[in-house]
Every structure is written in C-alpha cells, then in structure tokens.
Amino acid sequence: MALQRRHLLAALGAAAAPRARADVPGPGPLFAARPPLAPIVARPDRIIDIAVCTRPFRAQGPRLEAERRGRQTVIHNYGHGGSGWSLSWGSARLAVEMALATRERQLAVVGCGAIGLTTARVAQRAGLQVRIYCSERPPEVRSSAATGVWSPESRVCTEEHATPAFRQRWEAMTRHSFKVYQGLLGLAGTPVEWRDGYVLSDTPFGDPLPPLAETAAEPEYPDLEEAVRDLHPRSVALTREQHPFVPAHARRYAQLVFNLPAYTQWLLDGFFREGGVIEQRHFEHPREFARLKERTLVNATGWGARALFGDDSLVPVRGQTARLVPQPEVDYGITWRGHNLSVVTRRDGILVQAQAAGDFGSADTTPDRAASEAAVRRLASLYA
Ligand SMILES: Cc1cc2nc3c(=O)[nH]c(=O)nc-3n(C[C@H](O)[C@H](O)[C@H](O)COP(=O)(O)OP(=O)(O)OC[C@H]3O[C@@H](n4cnc5c(N)ncnc54)[C@H](O)[C@@H]3O)c2cc1C
C-alpha cells in the first residue's frame, strides 16, 4: 500500500491523489458524446517557465499552537507539506480562533504565502485589524511556485503520526477549506475551477506497481482521504474507446484547480480592501517580534520557520514544475501512474511536474531544465 501511495504522489507531485474507486455509471445513450480532447502540444521549446520550491513537511503534521513569548502570544501556523493551499482556510480558522482568545484586536501575521494570506483574511472577517510582515510577498513566495490543485493529504504527515486526534483535526480543516473553495467558484478571473483529470496506467489499476526510484526515500504517508470521500465525485473507469491516450487504462476524475496568479490577486485585493497593510520585513530571530506593536502574532513563515524558530522537524521536499504555453482549448489534467508524471492545466499555462530522486530532504531550488524537458517528452509520448 505504501508503495502504491508513493507512486501516486510521485505521479501527481503535489496534485490530488485520485484513487481507483467504485465505478459509477456513465451517461446513457440519449446524451451527446463528449467532444474529443484537444492534445497538449508537449515540446520542450514551449516551456515558458520552470519553478522550484520546497514543501514545508513535518512528520507530525502542521504546527498549530499558541506560545506565550514575553508580552506577546505567537500562534504557529506552518508546516503544511504538499497541502498548504488546500488546507489553508481550515488551518487559518483554527489559528484565528486562538488569536481571538487573546482578546487583542490587532493581529500581526508573519508571512505572506498561502497560509499567511488566508489567515489574514479570516482574521479580518472576524473583525481584527491585520498587518502582514514578510520577507517576500507574492509572486516571490514559495506558495506561488506550487501546482495549485486540491490535495489536502499530500505529504501532510507520516503514517506514524496520523493519530486519531490528528485525523480529526485534518478532517475538520479539509472540510472547512473545501466549503470555502466552493464559494470561490464562478468569480471573475476564475481563481478556482473544477476541471477533468485523467489517471492513465499501462497496467490494470488493481495491479501493484514496481517501486519507483524517485520516491524511494520518502516515508510512509497515511490514507486520510477515506474520511472525506463524500466531498467530491468518484472517478470513472473509461474503456479503450473512450480516451485518446496511449496507455491502455484510464479513469476520469474531477479535479479542483486553483489558478494561483488570479487566486492570489483575489486574496490580496480582499486584504487591502479591508484595510490590511503589508510591511516588508525579515526577522532573524523571534526576539525581534518584541519591537512590533501587536501583542498577538501568527507565525506563518512556512519553511522559514526552520531558521527563524530552529524547528528542525521541518523537512524540505523539493518540487519542480515546468509551465508550457497556455492552451485554452486544453481543459484537463493528466496523471501517468508509474511514470512519475503529473500535468495540471491552469489558465496561465500547462504545468508539468515530475519528482526527482533526492527531492525529499532537499532545499535546493536550482532549476534542472533537463529534468523538465524529459518530463515534457514523456507527456508527448502519451499522444503518439
Ligand atoms: C512543487 C510544489 C507543488 C505544490 N502543489 C500544491 C498543490 O497543488 N496544492 C496544495 O495544496 N499545496 C501544494 N504545495 C504545497 C504548498 O505550496 C505549501 O504547503 C504552501 O505553499 C506553504 O505555504 P506557506 O504560506 O506556509 O509558506 P510560504 O509560501 O513559504 O510563505 C512563507 C512566508 O513567510 C515569509 N517568511 C519566512 N521566513 C521569514 C522571516 N524570517 N521573516 C519574515 N518573513 C518570513 C516568506 O517571505 C513568505 O512570505 C506544493 C508545493 C510544492 C513545492
């Protein structure tokens, strides 16, 4: 089971891990067939950007707790691994509940990534005055280099730490985030949308896969999604005639996609509209917080918490994504099981992702163009 899950993570990168689920009936003969899928023009010369970032992974899961430091309360909200965007609203809600308990009306949020921005918005809606302090703001933050799909269980903790208490908190965060995201559908600029995804496989889905070298060093991750499988539609098995791809086996699923540039702008616009202020400021040590006027702070520094708070439990998990020229006619994503390939189609381009051996534990953010070109060529072979 662990191997199978590693395969999916590798194939998907940070993307949602659709598992083989019970088939549901397709449309009856009275309905029109789906139009043919437009092919992705997968050529290395169409790579317009390569982004590398590190997932802030903690074996014990995200750190969400309040700590008293002198006259201030610091609420930690970091370490969301490959699930930061997905869990952000649920995680923000828990952090803001802790902030409200201090009865302070002014809140400092340290960090302007997925976690800092959503925490700031939730705090504003709860009536707090919020100032964000950060070294970088979007699009320079690591969050801006993510894939942008619903993946609440991706590298969020290890099997060993998935206690009943953890599972309960994770489920609460997941359900709340999911609900918030459904409220962001249909907005101008399409910050969030549902798209189709295809999981492809050379062998039947029930067959075990050989070990994948790229993710061999990764720990065992728990199966958390089972608890929330009522949230979205199940995947559907397709016959050979129902899909155009080279691999014989395919399933279609529904994928929630975050168009990160538009979504981040939507978050920032809302933050400023409600009086939020961003101050560019780097902290070398938490004792510098004492100089801030706010007495309640949220630490949303992600990977930065390792240096700032000396939290050695944070492990970097490198991820690299190549972006191909946008193709508006392509409205689906792909995961090739066992081939370390995941493709997510966003409005700003087609994201091609593959894990590399050594990514787990690596904080190296140097782009490896040859690896991305190889992934793009693998993608091209799906249409041969
Ligand atoms: C390749 C890849 C793909 C991913 N895809 C997905 C996905 O599809 N879906 C999903 O849900 N998740 C995904 N993730 C995971 C997600 O990106 C992270 O969990 C998330 O970005 C973490 O957000 P954050 O706000 O904690 O950290 P960051 O984005 O790193 O933000 C940290 C903020 O803190 C600031 N900061 C740090 N240190 C200091 C300091 N000392 N002083 C002042 N400011 C400081 C930074 O400047 C920044 O503003 C992916 C990750 C990777 C690497």
Image (tube, rainbow, N blue to C red):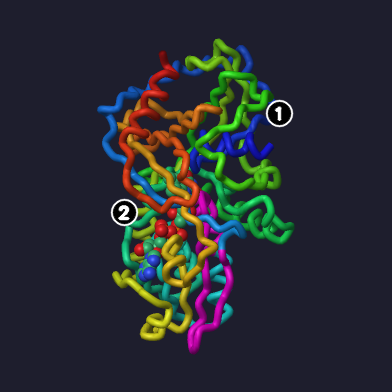
Q: Quadrant of ligand 1?
A: bottom left
The answer to whether residue 201 shows anywhere in this view is yes
Q: Going 60% across and 47% down the picture, which residue do you hit? A: 219
Decide if residue 207 is on the left or right side of residue 97: right
Q: Is residue 98 magenta?
A: no
Label 1, secondary structure: give it: loop
**Residue 160 in the image, given as x and y percentages of width and height:** 69, 54
| Between 305 and 242, the one nearer to me in the picture | 305
At label 2, the amino acid type is: Pro
At label 1, the amino acid type is: Ala
| Mark 1 / mark 2, whichever is N-terminal | 1
| Between 300 and 191, the one nearer to me in the picture | 300
**Residue 159 in the image, given as x and y percentages of width and height:** 67, 50
**Residue 266 in the image, given as x and y percentages of width and height:** 37, 54
| Between 63 and 196, the one nearer to me in the picture | 63
Cα distance in 3D space between marks 1 and 2: 40 Å
What segment carries the magenta color? 63-92
Looking at the image, is 224 positioned above or below residue 172? above
Q: Going 44% across and 50% down the picture, which residue do you hit? A: 362
Q: Is residue 82 magenta?
A: yes
- Work out which quarter of the rendered image holds the C terminus and state it: top left
The answer to whether residue 263 shows anywhere in this view is no
Q: Are marks 1 and 2 in contact (CB under 8 Å)?
A: no
Q: Residue furthest right?
A: 164
Q: Which residue is mark 2?
A: 139
**Residue 71 in the image, given as x and y percentages of width and height:** 49, 89
Residue 22, labelled with which disc? Answer: 1
Q: Going 29% across and 70% down the picture, which residue do you hit? A: 280
Q: Dot 1: within a 10 Å radius of its alpha carbon, few (fewer than 14), some, or many (20 or more) residues?
A: few
- Find residue 380 and report its image quarter: top left
Q: Going 32% across and 66% down the picture, which residue do you hit? A: 135
